[in-house]
Amino acid sequence: MKYNGYTSWNAWNVSLWINNDESLYRFAYDLVKQHGRYQAAKMLAGELDGQKTPDGATYNVTGIRQALQGM
């Protein structure tokens, strides 16, 4: 089941926060430029390990990878 074009509510929420928090977006964007989307997603997931969005969504590789699409 899809949620607003994402695989789940969690992935959608993670994408929402990464793409709308300026400092997090810039950090993610720089990682994508330097390492590519797949490696950047792994690196960002490692940095955010155990953290959640303010709405309670867990930052995981799947959600982050979807958020980085198009960067």
Image (cartoon, rainbow, N blue to C red):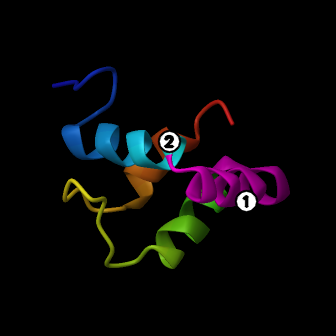
Q: Quadrant of the C terminus?
A: top right
Residue 41 x, y percent position in the rendering: 56, 58
Image marks 2 and 1: residues in contact by CB distance under 8 Å:
no
Q: Quadrant of the N terminus?
A: top left
Q: Earlier in the sequence, mark 2 or mark 1?
A: 2
Q: Is residue 3 above or below residue 39?
A: above
Q: Is residue 3 left or right of residue 27?
A: left
Span shown in magenta = 21-37
Residue placed at 22% from the left, 24% from the top? 2
Q: Which element type, helix, strand or loop, lies under badge 2?
A: helix
Residue 20 x, y percent position in the rendering: 50, 41
Which dot marks residue 20?
2
Find disc 1 in the rendering and name its residue: 31
Residue 27 x, y percent position in the rendering: 67, 61
Q: Residue furthest front?
A: 22
Q: Is residue 53 above or below residue 11?
A: below
Residue type at numbered disc 2: Asn
Q: Is residue 30 left or right of residue 14?
A: right
Residue 23 magenta-highlighted: yes
Q: Quadrant of residue 9?
A: top left
Which dot marks residue 3?
none
Residue placed at 22% from the left, 26% from the top? 3
